[in-house]
Amino acid sequence: MNSSPVLMSSRTLILASLFVAVIAIAIFIFISRRKSQSKRNLLLLIGPSDSGKTSIFSSLVYGHAVPTNTSMQVNSSFLNIQGKRDPIQIVDIPGHPRLRDQFKDSLSSAKALAFVVDAHTASRNAAVVAEHLHSVLDAIMAIPPSQPLPTLIIIAHKCDLIKASSLSADTSALAVTRVQTILERELERRRSSQSGGMGVEALGDDSNNEKSNIGGLDCSGPGGMFKFENWEGGEVVFLGTSVQGSQSEKSVKGSTAPLMDWIEENM
Amino acid sequence: MLDHCSISHQGGIVLWTRSFTPEASHIASSAASPVNSLIREALIESRTTGEKYEKDGFAVKWTFVNDLELIFVVAYQRILQLTYVEELLTALKALFVKLYHPFLTTFVASLHAGSSGKTSAAGIVTSLNFASAFEGWDKYFDTLLKKLEDKASQERKSRLRGPVHMQPIVDSPPLSDDQSTEPSQSEDATQDEQQIARNVQALKARLRGRGGRRPNMRSFDSGNGRDSVTNSDSEVIPKRKTTKKPGRKWGDEAPTEADMDSLNYSAEKSDVNNLKSPKDLQSLLDVTSLGSRTKDGLYEVKDWEFEINNTVSAALKTAEVESISTNSGSLGTLGSLFSRLTGSKVLTEQDLKPVLDEMKQHLMKKNVAREIADKVCEGVGESLIGKKVGGFQTTNSAVRMALSTSITRILTPKSSTDLLLSIRTKLSSPLTSTQQRIPFSMTFVGVNGVGKSTNLSKVCFWLIQNGLRVLIAACDTFRSGAVEQLRVHVRNLSVLGVDGAADSKGRVELFERGYGKDAAGIAKEAISYARDNDFDVVLIDTAGRMQDNEPLMRALAKLVTVNNPDKIIFVGEALVGNEAVDQLKKFDRALRDFSSGNGTGKERGIDGMLVTKWDTVDDKVGAALSMTYVTGQPIIFVGCGQTYTDLRQLRVSNVVQAILSD
């Protein structure tokens, strides 16, 4: 008489605890799945210094461009888009050569990488920009095949600074083609200089035998010339944007619109 | 006297900024602004030399608020010696944080969304209106700046005048003419010629006494004070000095002429001022009438002003108190003990000091030069003070982590180290039909016996392997046997096969002109020989020299200016300790100084480093850190053995690991 309730209660206790454990595991799985879903919802802003990453960031997040300095650390924020359940995380990586490698930390969860190029000075800084882009392309190619590849968006920023010729009124189209040709030419130069070259081994890596040269410029196109459309690392989208100071609020909305539209459609 | 002042977030967003002159505002909006170059060259590269940074004639001072990730920057003309800048920064910091703390915390939180685990809601800020958020700040700033300027000028005067007492009340009435433009404009007009002449003299004296000779200037000023014999006159002068200041307050609008003139003390400008203001006659009358006018006009703003005044002086006081309290030990040990137990705590200077000292010792044990170890640790400490250390992280591990990122940052090259690419780019660059292809030239410099020739031959081997034709120019015309040494190398290298060929004859040649000749001339001949004979690369070997030997350094600089090599590579040995800093600094300095004087106008420094004898130092690789810290240039190669193949590229993570390992 006395023992059965104890027995019963201990059994119920076991059952209850089992039940609780199952629920806990279910919740955990649910949360982690949600997390991993929302994890692949990230837009990375990368690119050389002074190309305008932080102003794009602020115009996306705060709705208007603010004056900026050179960034010293990563900015990260969420962007809510109407009609979407999850907000999109936007991460702005500093462009300083000593900080820019930080983008690799959040690469695995990125849905899209926006490489921002200053269209106005692109031809002057072509070699530097191409070197940076090269390391980005290399990083994308190094993503294991089990993961889906992020989309690479190349943003020709500061379109408004480019003087439109009388023929083509659309400065952003002009900027995009200009940036594309410059980058393709510069990357082709890098590719051809690497093929057939022999690098110097990196120090103290006899065991893992890693390549010291970065690759990532493989192309399936004819003649092996580097073209973004033939690049094996996935889709490359070109957009032209511009951001103006806070004094002209109206044009700001319109100028980052291409990027905004793309985000709304694809993310 | 300030040129530019800004408050920005470390992520790059500027919260508030103001330029005081049109030139400064023009520069500030470009990429080459003093703030940008401060961040790029001093802060990111952890190369903060002292608390002052100088660039293009600007002196820049800054301070951090680490928990809110803010940077306060003040830029002013380098020739001015402003005593109150430090105080201004501390007070600004205290005041700004106090006034806008809630806004700032939401702002900073909005920039860290996602990384902190908390998703959505908390992170999403639809819009922050910066303009409205900092609306009142301009007034606070004006008041603060004025107070400090007044105080500085008073201090100066009280020091030089001794018993003649300044009444602090004097500076409160002019405060209220902030809003009304008219009175102070007329006040600027009251600057009669005498006053301007005095100012010009004072400025000259200041220029002369530049470099910390303040007493000189003061005595000059005091002479002026004695010139104005009467007591009343001496009272007028300080009043003018104080009332002159508010003229600066319209800096955010386009400054008026009078505004600029009050700042600009050069003689021509003052003439213009006189022409423009024909009100010289009324100088004294105007001053007296002005007081009442301003009082009349500004009754309704008085309260608000007063409030600002109070807050500002409170901030000033707290700033002072803070600076005192940081000196006087820790208070509330019980509280800190408790917070230590509960986990998260805010790092203070006292917490960090022993750990940083230990780290410094550790770095020095790893052969990092003492000076560099000091600076690196200082930088790490600066970035950590005020940071919260959460959970189970100890101070020690936090410091270690910060040190590791700092060292990684220093060692990561900021320019391309891909030598092959730059060679190919140069060789393939388009030429006009009349131009001849100029070979890529590299000069190896360094002190005696570090292995310049040996490593030159290693680089040569690597270039040959990559299918390039190399000419070695024997410009060491001093040490006996130097040319013969290179001849042996060339003979060896030409026997070694490339790409299946039996030997690499014709791929490498030696260009020699014997001993005792002028090295610059030989190098020039070598380059033209290489151009005519279709060589791709010229490697120029120079004689080793002590960094203090000026005639030899001049000769080296001449070689550089005459031939303008594409790369100047400093060869240094990994065994070097404190000496590394001195060597590199002096080589770089000498090259820059002597090469800029020769008409070309462009300074030429060291482009990269080659560290030799790497295999002899085990994990005491501090020299690599010292060298990159001093020049900011990358280590292109590391020599680590006796054979031609013992040339390696530096791997940053390896070096960081070696330096931090116990």
Image (spheres, grey):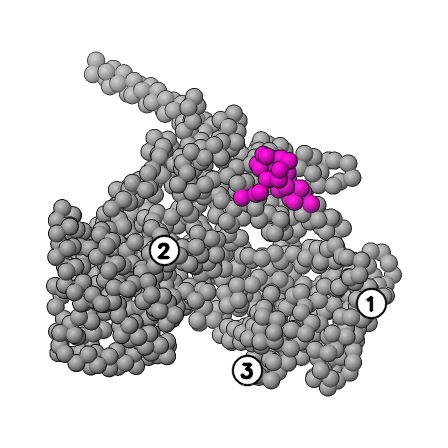
Mark number for residue B548? 3
Q: Which residues are magenta?
A: A161-185
Do discs 1 and 2 belong to a common subunit?
yes
Quick check: B610 left or right of B225?
right
The circle on residue A238 is: none
Residue A57 lies in quadrant: top left
In the rendered structure, does residue A143 fall within the stretch colored magenta?
Answer: no
The location of residue B236, given as percent across then percent down, is 17, 70
Query: Which amino acid does the dot numbered 1 rest on?
Result: Asp
| Quadrant of the rendered image containing residue B353 | bottom left
**Rendering coords of residue A267 (x, y %):** 50, 28
Give the mark, 1 or 2, whose residue is nearer the N terminus: 2
Which of the two discs, 1 and 2, sits closer to the camera? 2
Mark 1, residue position: B532
Q: Could one spot residue B41 in this view of the protein?
A: yes
In percent of the image, x 20 and y 16: which residue is there? A2
Check if mark 1's residue and mark 2's residue have beta carbons within 8 Å.
Answer: no
